[in-house]
Amino acid sequence: MNLLNPNIPKAVKKPKPVIEKIKFTEEQKGNIKRILEGKQRADAKVTQRTFNTSRGYKIARIRKITGGFCCICDICDRFNTHLLKYRTQGFVIVKRYCSEHVPTP
């Protein structure tokens, strides 16, 4: 307990995480492949506007499908493949990692 302010809780030791591999559906895999190749999604309506193939657009579309990037954002720009879930004090902390940076328990 903090002597200056008794309302501040003690630091809690982070529990051992549960590691889950993200299972992408075949549709998600196909959409990611099409985005990387610069093709429009199969389920997209055909319109007269130009399909945007910029790198920023591709990253945004893939991030929407995968949920984000690896938590090691300073050195890694890969998309996540694993979730680490820490259950503590009634809530769950979720971190996302690529297959290269997923920590071993």
Image (spheres, rainbow, N blue to C red):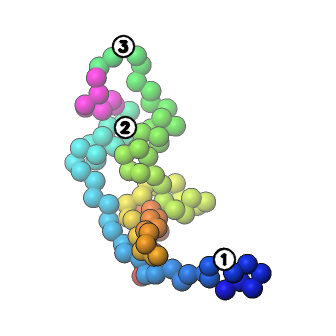
Tell me where residue 57 appears, x and y as whole percent. 48, 35
Residue at 44% over, 27% down: 52
Q: Which residue is mark 3?
A: 48
Mark 2 is on which residue type?
Ile
- Helix, strand or loop for the magenta stretch, by majority: loop
Q: Which is nearer the eye, 33 or 43?
A: 43
Q: Of the residues under marks 3 and 2, which one precedes in the sequence?
A: 2
In front: label 1 or label 3: 1
Tell me where residue 10 appears, x and y as whole percent. 62, 82
Name the quadrant of the C terminus: bottom left
Most extreme residue toward the right, as rendered?
4
Q: Which residue is mark 2?
A: 35
Q: Is residue 17 magenta?
A: no
| Res. 7 mark | 1
The part of the image, by quadrant, that contains residue 83 is bottom left
Q: Dot 1: few (<14), some (14–19), or many (≥20) neighbours within 10 Å?
A: few
Q: Of the residues under marks 1 and 2, which one precedes in the sequence?
A: 1
Mark 3 is on which residue type?
Gln
Tell me where residue 56 appears, x and y as whole percent. 52, 37
Tell me where residue 49 appears, x and y as whole percent. 40, 16
Depicted 44 relative to depicted 65: above or below: above
- Region rendered in magenta: 39-45
| Helix, strand or loop status at disc 3 | loop
Name the quadrant of the N terminus: bottom right
